[in-house]
Image (tube, helix red, strand yellow):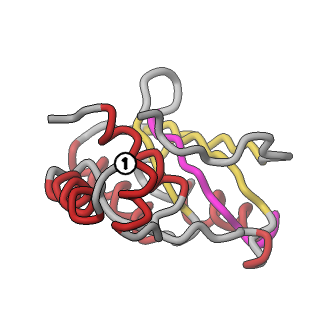
Amino acid sequence: MFDDTDKRLLAALQANAHLTAQELGDMLGLSASQAGRRRQRLEQAGIIRGYTARLDPGRLGLAVQAFVQVQMASHAPRDARSFARLIETRTEVVSAWTLTGRADYLLRVYCDDLTALNRLVHDVLLPHDAVSKVHSQIVMDQPKADAPLPT
């Protein structure tokens, strides 16, 4: 159900989600209707979850990118849900992962400046009842931008 043509279609859409069915068809050696049906099938299967615009954080005034590791004092389900709700409401937190090892969560955050990052850590994360420790790492440079997924 998932063949090399599907992989090429996904790679093309990751590079440019604005491609029309005709453009996809031309790239894949298919008719526009065949390319459109393949795209629709991949959307319906949940392989393509949506389409978004990639914004430049610097041009939006978000000068600081950081990774914040959070160690929990409590792993009780109620505390985990409470912390998950907290990070879901914070626009600075653009992604979050639960981890094995010392840190329980890894948060990717964008802030206007170091003061805003400090406020996030000291006024939002550390006061949470279930949080034990927070360790932040400020990104100095990003030699490889977020890349498309391998297909």
Please indicate whether residue 6 sits to the left or right of residue 111 in the image.
left
Instruction: Name the residue furthest bottom.
Output: 60
Residue 147 point in image, percent of width and height: 59, 44
Q: Is residue 97 magenta?
A: no
Q: What type is the residue that disc 1 sits on? A: Gly
Residue 74 point in image, percent of width and height: 35, 38
Residue identified by numbered label 1: 29
* Residue range corresponding to the magenta coloring: 104-115
Query: Vertically, is 97 above or below 112?
Result: above
Please indicate whether residue 69 sits to the left or right of residue 9 in the image.
right
Q: Which element carries disc 1, helix, strand or loop? A: loop
Residue nearest the observer in this picture, 78 or 26: 26
Residue depicted at 78% across the width and 45% down the height: 142
Badge 1: residue crowd in 10 Å (few <14, some 14–19, many ≥20): few
Residue depicted at 39% across the width and 48% down the height: 28
Instruction: Name the residue furthest top.
Output: 101
Please indicate whether residue 46 sits to the left or right of residue 29 in the image.
left
Residue nearest the observer in this picture, 68 or 9: 9
